[in-house]
Amino acid sequence: MFLKRLELNGFKSFAGKTVLDFPKGVTAIVGPNGSGKSNVIDAIRWLLGERDAKSLRGGKIEDLIFAGTDGKAKLGVAAAALIFDNSSKFFPVDFNEVEIKRQIARDGESSYFINKSEVRLKDIIELLSKSRLGTKGVIVVGQGNSDIFIKANPVERREMVEEILGLREFRIKKEEAERKLRNTFINTDKVKALIEEVLPHLRFLKKQTAKWERRSEVEEQLEILEKNFFGSKRAEIEKNFFGLDPKESELSKKEGLTRRELREKEEELKKVEDLEPESRALLVKIRARREEVLRKKNVAEKELGGLEVRLLMAEKEEEKGQVDSGKAVSFLEEVFKKAKEVVESGFNVDLAVALVRKIAEGGEKIFSFSEKREAGAVEEIRAKQKKNYEEVDIFDREIKEINAKEAGLERNLEKFTDNFKKAFTEVEKVKEEVNRILAEKNKVVLEKERWNFKLQELKAQVEQAGRSWNTFSLKDAEFLREEELIETEKKIFKLRGELFAMGEVDQALVKEAKETEDRHNFLVTQIADLLKASEDLKEMIRNLAEKIHEEFNEALVLINKEFDKFFKMMFKGGHAKLLLRKEEVVAEGEEGEERKENEEAEKVIIKEARDIEAGLEINLSLPKKKVTNLEVLSGGERSLVSLAALFGLISVSPPPFLVLDEVDAPLDEKNALRFAEMIKDFSEKLQFIVVTHNRATMEAADVLYGVTLGEDGASKVVSLKLS
Ligand code: ATP
């Protein structure tokens, strides 16, 4: 048992809640014309996903809602539900019972439910198609449609067969994939158009910004070079600058020490100097005394010289008498003169006396007169002479003393001079040393100043280069040797020149270029994604088409065999066959416009679908008749052919149930009887819900429902027979 129950509420003529239980086998629905039998079938069709109001025998979808009668007011909502036994898991869901419910309100709002959960219509159609149930095929054959198979065009016939074979699911999937493929192609075209639109602008921007492309690279390079260059220079200068520090402090220390030494030496010199005035003054004093003594001695000696001469003269006078006084006076004057010269020339008194004596001896001739002198003159002179000699002696002794003292003092002074000289030399030496140190220190200071100047110069250079001084330590710079520095400087100049030539970057333009490029890349990626997606879809379409093609063609052979069998049975001979109409590969109609829009996609789809778009022709020959055109068949014949095809189909692929609305109506009694037998036979495999006025069919039924119109004009169902 598959179809369990149909519940109606407000659906068409069924105003009240109506329940029809379907047992296994054949359920026949009977009743007078217009009682609402076909409305039951409409409800089933509606529940199987029919959307077309016309197929449901209504002008618009709200015609499905009970419109009211003289005795009963119209309703606002129509609802119907089909309940399936799913213990065999015919539907691929976990439930043992599946209820499909549809509801429509007068405002047009539709609701769909699977097992009380609200779903979309699409979900219902998908579930049913997976289970080979739908409205395209022959599951529900409506009233007046007993010749459905003849009436249908080749493509519709194919759809019916596909639905019964359960290929509808794949067809839906394929159509979905085709729709997606079309969209993919449309999107690809759109994206291509966008790329075409973006590309010239991007090229323009790229051209504009190309000159700056190398800028950041050059800037980076320049930064590294400058870092190394300035860093090395700074390091070198600082090394030299600070390298002088120890020397400077050493010199300062040395200066301090030497200055201290100088002070000491100067003190020593002062001490020596302090000793000097005493001896010197003394020396001056005794020398002055000696001068005085010498002068006195000289006077005494002169006197002595005179006395000697007087003595000589006095003695001569005593011996020879008086001499020529004129001659004697000039002679004496001569002798005095000589004696004076002798004394003045430094000869001592003795020498002067001896000299005067000699001269006086020569003068004897002059003094040849003998003059008698008074006695006692010689003694007097001699006494005086003695006194003078004593005086001279005293003077000599003093002079001697003075000389001795002078020698002593001079010796002392010499020692002082030596000491002074020594101390003085020492002071001078240390002074020189201080000067030497100062000169050296000055040199160091100057040298440092020179390096400092260089450092300031470098700082200015760094600033000029627009760099921060602090980034140019040697910490992360490479230390360059002299020749490398020259090389690096050259490179720096070159790169700076290059940057200058590039000009300032227009950030707005660069930003725009970047954004445009991003957009372009995004679009290119999208194209790639779309192409990949279309490849996948094509593959999917191919696979589905192949599956449909294979399964359909395989089944068609079997169907034809059965069709022919039933045909022969019904027409007592002849033969019938379904043929693929390959020339009608290209489906016409509503998709034409779209196809033109997207020829590329269509080419692919059509190529892949070629084999499965072929419709089905009915090829038959009736016994004893030359019928080639289906149009010439009688109404009953048309129904018989259709039924033969229907039975052929269901014997190859039996659906879970069939709903047939008065398909037996055009049949004569014999054929109606045969029909009744056939459904009885098939009811072993599938359920039948048939609307009939035919007694044979009614007799074949396991359950009989009578539909009548009640007093209020609404349809009612009564169970007439239970099997
Ligand atoms: P026949 O044996 O002649 O085929 P039937 O039993 O199949 O008759 P239906 O076609 O099922 O009859 O029922 C038609 C009846 O249902 C009509 O009388 C029609 O007025 C009625 N009907 C259809 N739609 C509605 C509706 N929305 N509200 C009320 N009644 C409706």
Image (tube, rainbow, N blue to C red):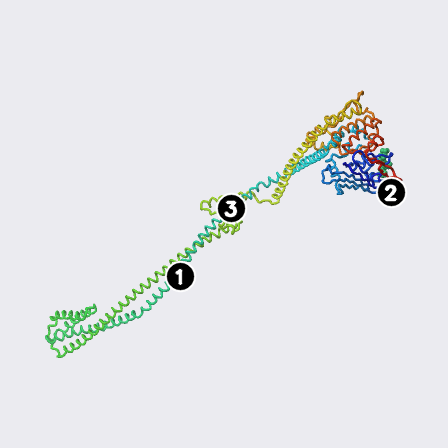
Quadrant showing the N terminus: top right
Mark 1 → mark 2, Cα distance in angstroms: 130 Å
Name the amino acid type tagged 2.
Ala
Name the amino acid type tagged 3.
Ile
Question: What secondary structure is marked by label 3?
Answer: helix
- Residue that label 1 marks: 256
Picture coordinates of residue 619, whole percent (x, y): 76, 24
Q: Is residue 652 above or below residue 431?
A: above
Q: Is residue 316 above or below residue 153?
A: below
- Residue that label 3 marks: 224
Q: Compare residues 337 and 45 and report the one nearer the observer.
A: 45
- Residue that label 2 marks: 73
Disc 2 beta carbon < 8 A from ligand 1? no
Picture coordinates of residue 502, whole percent (x, y): 56, 42
Name the amino acid type tagged 1.
Gly
- Residue 334 visible in the snapshot: no
Question: Pointer 2 and pointer 3: residues touching (CB < 8 Å)?
Answer: no
Question: What secondary structure is marked by label 1?
Answer: helix
- Residue 100 visible in the snapshot: yes
Mark 3 → mark 1, Cα distance in angstroms: 47 Å
Label 3 vs 1, first from the N-terminus: 3
Q: Compare residues 611 and 102 and report the one nearer the observer.
A: 102
Q: Is residue 575 above or below residue 266?
A: above
Mark 3 Cα-neighbour bin, 10 Å: few <14, some 14–19, many ≥20: some
Disc 3 beta carbon < 8 A from ligand 1? no
Label 1 vs 2, first from the N-terminus: 2
Question: What secondary structure is marked by label 2?
Answer: loop
